[in-house]
């Protein structure tokens, strides 16, 4: 699918030119921001806004990152066998196919801009405490975005950390502006995680704590850091950061109450939204292809169907149906056009009539922090069953205030993550990070017999199921003599 080109500030348009050149595919950032184009804090604000703008396109958080987290697991399936998401569902990845190699190019284009900004921002004058705070905040956002990008590269192109303690191939590290044409080898997953963790910790020293809609602030960076630690299996630190958020965030963020839960998905910047990317009509993102349009048909008249590529599986619908009084039942909608059940979570940003293409991609919510804290409380070196119960029940009882209190287990937390975070890009990565089998043998799967090998997937078996990680496209390898393909491809 094609998007209209974003109308960005001149400096961002200039930087984007470097993101598409052949040399850029080698490793990552290759050019500096011209000093005569960015030399004030207002210029720096525009550059940092451009980082988020580049993240919200279809080939990253605008659609495909969500699909990689959901469509390779057991909760979503393609509606039709001719959509692009069948390739993801079937693990039909190849170095010769360009469908999903866009992650590498997109992410490194963002790293180019972040590193170029970090290289020069300390030179910008700041003549008051307010300007110093602003400069630090912009710098902190660049570090946080850089940390997120490295984490995502590790998740997409590297095997799960706990499988081999991060020994497998990860990203080409981009912690500086890399000279144009310079080839660099891939680091390990562990080294990639180390960069993400260091950048996020650095961002915490710089970011402001006030809400900053559509941007990283202190709390969003801390939430992402707790997620990275959870994936790494460093449960002590995962719990530390998640628990600190939940006990000190005060009135800045709070869980959406039960009675507002469904309607909150049609609002921007709800009370628990830590980080979402802003999709608005003036942004010129093609409103037929925003993240919501992949879940819900754009035309719902009986007998017609436009858009809507992914359906909840029968297994996931059965899980939600276990409790008829669970408020999240309201997110599954029966289409009058097809009779299928659709995920109506991404319902559009309060526009009339609803436009499911104009929904902000969700990156971090407070609900996830509760579930990170619960799981980590169980797994840390000194388990805390009381905190695990408390944080798990906060999400369960928000969904249905009448459910009985439960004793938290890892399986109970994973079940609740499946219910609460469905469609947001977590399920595959949850199963993969823990080495759980991914079972798609339900009768509504759409895998043809030739792909039956991937009906049940062991994400820690890198010999038989090597396609749980993406390949590097052959162009990326051809221009980088130090590059190394993932095993099996």
Image (cartoon, grey):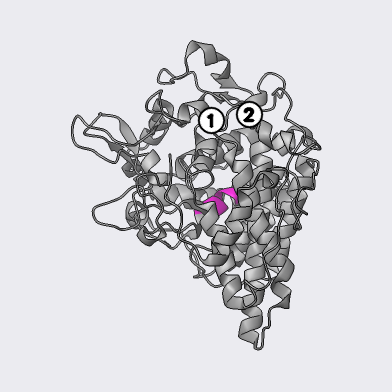
Q: Position of residue 429 (x, y in %)?
A: 60, 37
Contact? badges 1 and 2 (CB < 8 Å): yes
The label number, if any, that marks residue 72 in the structure image = 1
The magenta-colored residue range is 367-372
Q: Nearer the viewer, residue 87 or 368?
A: 87
Image side of residue 153 versus residue 289, left or right:
right
Nearer-the-camera pick, 405 or 76: 76
With respect to residue 45, does 277 lie above or below?
above
Residue found at x 68% / y 47% = 24
Along the viewing direction, whichever of 205 and 471 lies nearer the viewer: 471
Q: CA distance from mark 1 to mark 2?
A: 8 Å
Q: Quadrant of residue 142?
A: bottom right
Counting other residues with Cα less than 10 Å from the Cα at mark 1, is it few (<14), some (14-19), or many (20 or more)?
A: many
Which residue is located at x 73 percent, y 34 percent?
478
Q: Residue under circle 2?
A: 468
Q: Closest to the observer: 272 or 389?
A: 272
């Amino acid at each position: 699918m094609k998007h209209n080109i974003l109308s960005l500030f001149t400096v961002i348009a200039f930087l984007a030119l470097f993101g598409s050149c052949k040399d850029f595919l080698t490793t990552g950032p290759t050019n500096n921001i011209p000093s005569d184009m960015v030399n004030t804090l207002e210029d720096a604000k525009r550059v940092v806004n451009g980082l988020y703008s580049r993240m919200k396109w279809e080939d990253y958080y605008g659609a495909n990152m969500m699909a990689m987290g959901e469509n390779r697991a057991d909760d979503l399936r393609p509606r039709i066998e001719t959509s692009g998401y069948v390739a993801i569902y079937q693990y039909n990845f190849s170095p010769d196919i360009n469908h999903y190699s866009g992650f590498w190019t997109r992410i490194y284009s963002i790293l180019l801009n972040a590193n170029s900004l970090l290289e020069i921002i300390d030179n910008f004058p700041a003549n008051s405490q307010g300007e110093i705070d602003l400069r630090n905040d912009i710098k902190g956002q660049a570090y946080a975005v850089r940390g997120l990008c490295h984490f995502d590269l590790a998740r997409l192109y590297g095997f799960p950390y706990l499988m081999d303690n991060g020994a497998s191939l990860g990203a080409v590290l981009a912690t500086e502006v890399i000279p144009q044409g310079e080839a660099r080898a891939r680091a390990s997953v562990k080294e990639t995680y180390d960069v993400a963790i260091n950048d996020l910790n650095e961002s915490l020293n710089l970011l402001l704590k006030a809400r900053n809609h559509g941007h990283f602030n202190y709390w969003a960076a801390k939430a992402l850091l707790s997620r990275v630690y959870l994936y790494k299996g460093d449960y002590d630190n995962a719990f530390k950061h998640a628990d600190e958020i939940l006990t000190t965030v005060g009135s800045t963020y709070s869980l959406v109450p039960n009675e507002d839960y469904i309607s909150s998905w049609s609002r921007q910047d709800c009370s628990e939204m830590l980080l979402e990317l802003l999709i608005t009509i003036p942004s010129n993102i093609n409103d037929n292809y925003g993240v919501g349009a992949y879940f819900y048909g754009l035309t719902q008249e009986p007998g017609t169907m436009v858009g809507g590529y992914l359906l909840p599986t029968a297994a996931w619908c059965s899980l939600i149906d276990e409790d008829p009084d669970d408020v999240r039942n309201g997110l599954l909608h029966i289409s009058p056009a097809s009779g299928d059940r659709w995920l109506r979570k991404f319902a559009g940003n309060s526009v009339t009539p609803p436009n499911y293409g104009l929904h902000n991609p969700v990156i971090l919510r407070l609900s996830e922090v509760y579930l990170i804290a619960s799981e980590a409380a169980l797994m840390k070196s000194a388990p805390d069953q009381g905190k695990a119960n408390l944080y798990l029940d906060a999400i369960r009882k928000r969904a249905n205030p009448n459910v009985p209190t439960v004793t938290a287990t890892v399986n109970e937390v994973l079940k609740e993550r499946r219910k609460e975070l469905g469609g947001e890009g977590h399920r595959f990565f949850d199963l993969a990070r823990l080495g759980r089998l991914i079972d798609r043998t339900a009768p509504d799967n759409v895998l043809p017999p030739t792909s039956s090998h991937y009906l049940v997937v062991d994400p820690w078996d890198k010999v038989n199921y090597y396609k749980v990680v993406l390949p590097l496209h052959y162009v990326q390898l051809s221009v980088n003599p130090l590059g190394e393909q993932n095993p099996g491809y």
